[in-house]
Amino acid sequence: MKPAPFNYVRADSIEQAVEALAGSSDGKVLAGGQSLIPLLSMRLAGPSLLVDINGIAGLDEVRADSDGVHLGALARHADVLANTAAREVQPLVAAALSHVGHATIRNRGTTVGSLVHADASAEMPLILLLLAGSLDVVGPRGRRTIPAESLYIGPLESSLEHDEVAVEAFFPALPPMTGIAFEEVARRQGDYALCGVGAVVEVDGGHVRSARAGFMSVHDVPVVAELTEHLAGMSLSTQEGRVVLEAAVEHAMGALDPAADVHASEAYRAHLARVLAKRVVAAAFSDATHRAATRPAVGSEA
């Protein structure tokens, strides 16, 4: 199929993009287009206006500092994945990005565009939520920051206003003594995941200090479960720790509502969520203990 007719504006500045969107009640922003163009072609979306921001200079920045990773609206998945500094500052971003689509999609698709698309089956919305990141947007009322916890409000629905443009995403840096892990199950590498789980675990003296896990493709929005209450003080490398972890995951399942579709039944998705959550939280704990063991002592030379 071909897209329905629409007007097209190639913006040269954020201000021009915002002005164009403000004049339309259903305008869409075109960045990477890897999600939007298929929807247009299948006529699952039919905006009257398409605002292309690819001509705006300075939106492709990938910057990593002590606070975290900052990604401009035109930063391609492949560029973020290849950025060594970003990988070191927040390794969970790269761990999840390696599962996004295929190479061709990563070369063109943008991480910020994926965040705004708000697909509960996509990796990056989950990672932003799991890391308590944020998204900066610009509209007629100026610039504002949307915390990840307030960004996703329904299936394929974010809290951006129709006349706002997302300009930058922020993923906080990985704290010391903290480990990460991410895993998903898909029918083929690069396909949408049947289920995916990420985890962040902080340790202290070989025991869990804090832990949380995030789930994708099992609810209409990404879901993060706080596991600290159950796992604090436990070593997940012991039999007792593994038993407690299993109970913690069962408790977390109460926040999920796996749905059946042509790819997987409700029971199968729930099974995947349980198995992956236990595996990924344990892997994040191992990563954290390894990082803690290899961390330079205070006062030692670099």
Image (cartoon, rainbow, N blue to C red):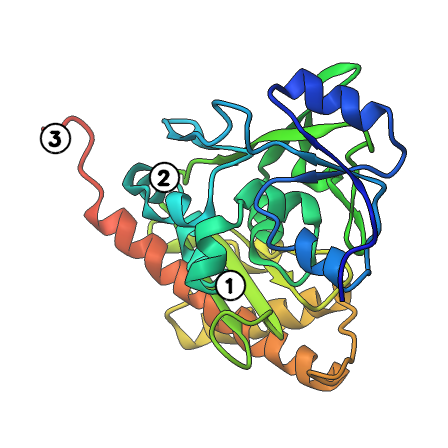
Position of residue 128 measured from the top left corner of the image (x, y, whole percent): 58, 44
Per the image, the residue denoted by label 1 is 101
Rendered view: 275 above or below 109? below
Dot 1 crowding, Cα within 10 Å, few <14, some 14–19, many 20+: many
Per the image, the residue denoted by label 3 is 302
Specify whether 279 is left or right of 4.
Answer: left
Asked whether the viewer can see residue 40, the reply is: yes
Q: Residue furthest left?
A: 301
Mark 2 or 3, nearer chain start: 2
Q: Secondary structure at mark 1?
A: loop
Which kind of residue does numbered mark 2 sit on?
Ala
Badge nearest the viewer, 1 or 3: 1
Mark 2 or 1, nearer chain start: 2
Q: Secondary structure at mark 3?
A: loop
Badge nearest the viewer, 2 or 1: 1
Image-quadrant location for residue 13: top right
Separation of disc 2 and disc 1 at Cα? 20 Å
What is the number of the mark on residue 86?
2
Rendered view: 88 above or below 207? above
Dot 3 crowding, Cα within 10 Å, few <14, some 14–19, many 20+: few
Quarter containing the N terminus:
bottom right
Q: Residue at x 56, y 33 (%)?
A: 54
Separation of disc 2 and disc 3 at Cα? 20 Å
Which kind of residue does numbered mark 3 sit on?
Ala
Badge nearest the viewer, 2 or 3: 2
Specify whether 66 is left or right of 135.
Answer: left
